[in-house]
Image (cartoon, rainbow, N blue to C red):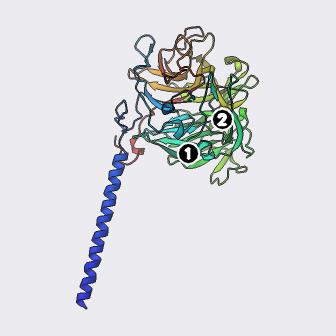
Amino acid sequence: MHMLLFTLSFFEKAWQYTALMILTSLIITSIAQQSVQAQPPADLPWDLDPDCGSIMKDGICAATCGVTVGTPIAERWTFGMMDISDALPAAGRVDVTATTPMYHHPEWHIDYIGNVFGLSVDDCGYTYVCASSNYSSHFFTEESVIQYGSIGGGAEDVNAAGTIYIIDFETGQPSVFAVLPQQAANFTNNTCEGFTTVDRFTGPGLGNITYSTEHQSFYVTNFEDGRIYRLDKEGTILESYDPGAYDDGLPGTTDFHDMPYGIDISPDGNELFYGLNGSAATNAILMSIPLSITGGFTGTVDNTNMPAGASWDNYVDATETEHYNLTSDFGEFWYDFTMSDLEFTPSGDILIGVRITCFGNIHTSYNHTGTTLLVEPGGGGLLDQLEGVIYTSYENFRNDAYGGVAVFENPAGGIEFVISSADILTEPGPHGVTTQSEGVFGTAMMGASPEGVISYNYGGGAFTDPKGVGGDVQLKVPCLCETCPTGVEA
């Protein structure tokens, strides 16, 4: 009997030891795999951020854009990062196209993330990119590639239409951060110049996104229901707000003039600003609503016409304040225009990126008459005084911007405005990113070039000046590493 007990005890301990060794091996393997996966890209043209160890650091500009069928398949990037640290020279304008480091992760390709527009960066260096349907179906003489991404679900997948992609802070790998509600509907991506259209049956996609360090929250505009969504840092929808007319719950975009697009949080964190779309008959309007002390929406809860499976509250009837009114004087009468991107400056002014669309259709884009405005506080606490128009184009008496704006404190301590633009040298093209010193507006005259120019033309193709291809731009926010993933040290 004692011998039997000894034998059982021996085998039990042997099994426990074996199990422990297997578990230890799995843990070591997992750690090793994570270590391998966490390696920064070997071909990254710059060093990692010294504070948070991220690929997004001071001077790095994230940019989105469209692509054409003439672009070599392997080069059909819809998102990239570039170093603009030296884009603004000490004296005079310079074209830094040939010397600016540009990086594309292999999966920042249209097949993987599809058409994307809106951008944001959090305080750990993660970048967030929104699925979009707002690119033209034709860029002048070239057809464009119109689709959503396979990582989000597929080229015409409804979930992919509502996907916010997160770009890993260290590896650059894109993955799904969150999916906002979408419903499939028939719509057409068209072109302002009357070329080929693309008929689609899927979700209409997202507008833009901003991140609040103070509230540790994201705010995203949704073309499908015209709502603004608040998300936490895990990608969970916390609540939504429906400005203007209440959504009817039917598939397809909300009313063009009741659709929030560009979005930003006031420097004190108390207000959320958003832009509504305009046309020859209706102004585009800069609006704001107050936020609670924790960054939540205010007003009353109305949970009728909610998306299927919604577990959050929808707010309405907050105090909606009208600020700056943008008239069609900045465009041509057959164009419509959107406030597609908003960015507060350190001095408390607001940059407004105006993106051109046509025929009241959000599913297109154009460069001609796209504008960048700087608006400052007027009386009564309103941001309603135009400080100036930032001209970045060679065109005579008009601008050619794509509606993406950002603010950059350059290595010399100066403030630059970064703008996605077209026709930005002294001749048509290239299309890319311009930088302009704060307080420099230029004039609406032929040859009014910006101070710094960075082209994102792909080059080498049969046609290297694709109209309507530009998207959004975004730069790093201050790094607060205590909110970052475990293992990231300041």
Looking at the image, which residue sits at the far top?
446
x, y (%) of residue 477?
Answer: 45, 34
Tag 2 residue: 260
Mark 2 vs mark 1: give the one in front.
Answer: 1
Tag 1 residue: 152
x, y (%) of residue 85?
Answer: 40, 23
Looking at the image, which residue sits at the far bottom?
1
Instruction: Indicate left or right for 17 with 452 as reference.
Output: left
| Residue found 62% across the figure and 9% down from its top | 396
Question: Secondary structure under badge 2?
Answer: strand
Q: Amino acid at mark 2?
A: Pro
Asked if residue 287 shows in the view, the reply is yes
Instruction: Indicate left or right for 62 with 312 as reference.
Output: left
Instruction: Indicate left or right for 95 with 444 as reference.
Output: left
Q: How many marks?
A: 2
Q: How would you rate the neighbour count of disc 1 (Cα within 10 Å): few for under 14, some for 14-19, many for 20 or more?
A: many
Quarter holding residue 194: top right
Tag 1 or tag 2, which sits nearer the N-term? 1
* In the depicted structure, whether residue 89 falls above or below residue 137: above
Q: Amino acid at mark 1?
A: Gly
* In the depicted structure, whether residue 42 falls above or below residue 456: below
Q: Quadrant of the N terminus?
A: bottom left
Camera-side residue: 378 or 366? 366
Camera-side residue: 400 or 442? 400
x, y (%) of residue 444?
Answer: 60, 10
Quarter holding residue 318: top right
Q: Quadrant of the C terminus?
A: top left
Mark 2–mark 1 Cα distance, whole angstroms, equals 23 Å
